[in-house]
Image: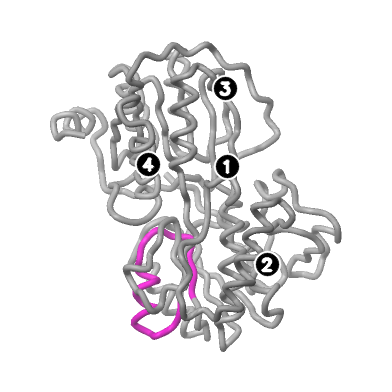
């Protein structure tokens, strides 16, 4: 995107450097809503595709993962598409202005990559019924609005398996953003994987009430180290945790994108999002006029999430164990929340032979056995 177009959007939105998340603590996507019928979409060549990002692209993290997906789509479709992205767009009124301007500028497919963009997306979509909109992690569908989300619980489980084999203290530190279902189920999936390889290990969680705050993340990581943690993981978006792990000569897992470049020795692997295939398939559906509104929630097998290459410090037998479980996730013969599962009070939440269904995961507000502490009340993002 050239500077002139950026200034046009910046004037409309009055951007700040405030960092927001793909999910708001107020809500979590629901799988129970009926899918409406799609309206016909008229697309001309090349298809103009717009993206709205919550922060600068940078070279790691949430927004960077979406931009990698955009670039992959461009490489796959070449002259069939023309893309535009607007970065550092606050959620709310500013987002509505930017989304509307992208529509006015002739973009026939618009991806809004934050839960906080859901309501603005729905509002603008009503004004432009012939344009396709896709909102990341939202739950509201319309005739020309779909939603998409990755099953990051699968790679979380795999990283937990690794942690169980790499810890010596049996204490794992987890830095959480906001205590909402998305984050809670990630912590629980990690713990399920951890306990599958090391039933004695425990997870301690500290919350920073932010999606991106390097100072707070580092402070929380240090506090967890002081509590005995010798492996760290996170549901926050900076590299501060990884960098502190390297400084303290312990291990850590990255998040959203491969964070190995920040600490090659400390980095075990990262739980990553992969949006390229979805973006490519969605653009092709728009071009071929076969797109329909739906709730997309895909895992490793569908190419939407994964783990990055494992550090060779991980013993080969552990890597084989993790790869075997990964293949089971791909084949659909395993699930991060296979029963029996007890909560931290000992109550059976998922009986043997059952699986915690999508609705249960989307509403998760309890810890599995093996996590210490209680879940604080979520703060509402402004």
- Tell which tag, 2 or 3, sits nearer the viewer: 3
Numbered disc 3: secondary structure:
loop
* Mark 4 crowd level (few <14, some 14–19, many ≥20, 10 Å Cα): some
For residue 292, the mark is 3
Q: CA distance from mark 3 to mark 4?
A: 22 Å
Q: Name which of mark 3 and mark 1 comes first in the sequence.
A: 1
Residue 97 at least partly seen: no
Viewer-proximal residue, 270 or 242? 270
In the image, what residue occupies the spot 34% across and 20% down?
103
In the image, what residue occupies the spot 47% across and 40% down?
277
**Residue ID for mark 4:** 72
- Tell which tag, 1 or 2, sits nearer the viewer: 2
Question: What segment is highlighted magenta in the picture?
Answer: 232-251
**Residue ID for mark 2:** 192
- Tell which tag, 3 or 1, sits nearer the viewer: 3
* Colouring style: one colour
Label 3–label 1 contact, CB within 8 A: no
**Residue ID for mark 1:** 27
How far across and down, in percent of the image, does residue 5 sit?
18, 29
Label 4–label 1 contact, CB within 8 A: no
Viewer-proximal residue, 221 or 250? 250
Numbered disc 4: secondary structure:
helix
Magenta segment includes 247 = yes
Q: Name which of mark 4 and mark 1 comes first in the sequence.
A: 1
- Indicate whether 267 appears above or below 153: below
Magenta segment includes 234 = yes
- Tell which tag, 2 or 4, sits nearer the viewer: 4
In the image, what residue occupies the spot 48% across and 30% down?
282
Q: CA distance from mark 4 to mark 1?
A: 30 Å
Q: Quadrant of residue 163?
A: bottom right
Q: Name which of mark 3 and mark 4 comes first in the sequence.
A: 4
């Amino acid at each position: 995107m050239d500077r002139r177009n950026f200034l046009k959007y910046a004037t409309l939105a009055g951007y700040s450097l405030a960092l927001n998340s793909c999910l708001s603590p107020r809500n979590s996507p629901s799988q129970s809503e009926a899918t409406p019928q799609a309206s016909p979409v008229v697309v001309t060549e090349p298809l103009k595709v717009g993206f709205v990002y919550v922060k600068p692209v940078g070279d790691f993290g949430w927004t960077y993962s979406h931009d990698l997906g955009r670039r992959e789509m461009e490489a796959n479709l070449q002259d069939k598409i023309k893309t535009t992205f607007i970065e550092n767009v606050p959620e709310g009124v500013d987002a509505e202005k930017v989304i509307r301007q992208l529509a006015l500028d002739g973009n026939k497919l618009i991806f809004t990559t934050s839960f906080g963009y859901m309501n603005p997306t729905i509002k603008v979509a009503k004004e432009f019924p012939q344009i396709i909109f896709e909102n990341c992690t939202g739950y509201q569908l319309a005739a020309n609005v779909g939603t998409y989300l990755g099953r990051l619980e699968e790679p979380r489980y795999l990283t937990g398996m690794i942690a169980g084999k790499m810890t010596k203290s049996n204490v794992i530190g987890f830095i959480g953003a906001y205590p909402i279902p998305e984050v809670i189920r990630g912590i629980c999936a990690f713990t399920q994987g951890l306990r599958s390889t090391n039933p004695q290990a425990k997870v301690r969680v500290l919350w920073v009430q932010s999606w991106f705050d390097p100072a707070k993340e580092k402070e929380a990581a240090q506090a967890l180290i002081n509590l005995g943690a010798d492996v760290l993981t996170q549901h926050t978006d900076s590299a501060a945790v990884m960098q502190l792990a390297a400084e303290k000569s312990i291990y850590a897992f990255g998040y959203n994108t491969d964070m190995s470049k920040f600490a090659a020795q400390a980095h075990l692997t990262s739980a990553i999002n992969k949006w390229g295939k979805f973006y490519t398939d969605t653009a092709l559906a728009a071009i071929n006029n076969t797109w329909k509104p739906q709730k997309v929630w895909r895992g490793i097998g569908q190419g939407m999430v994964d783990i990055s290459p494992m550090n060779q410090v991980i013993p080969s037998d552990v890597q084989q164990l993790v790869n075997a479980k990964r293949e089971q996730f791909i084949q659909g013969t395993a699930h991060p929340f296979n029963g029996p599962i007890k909560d931290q009070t000992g109550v059976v939440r998922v009986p043997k032979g059952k699986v915690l269904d999508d609705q249960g995961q989307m509403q998760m507000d309890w810890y599995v056995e093996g996590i210490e502490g209680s879940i604080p009340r979520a703060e509402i993002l402004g």
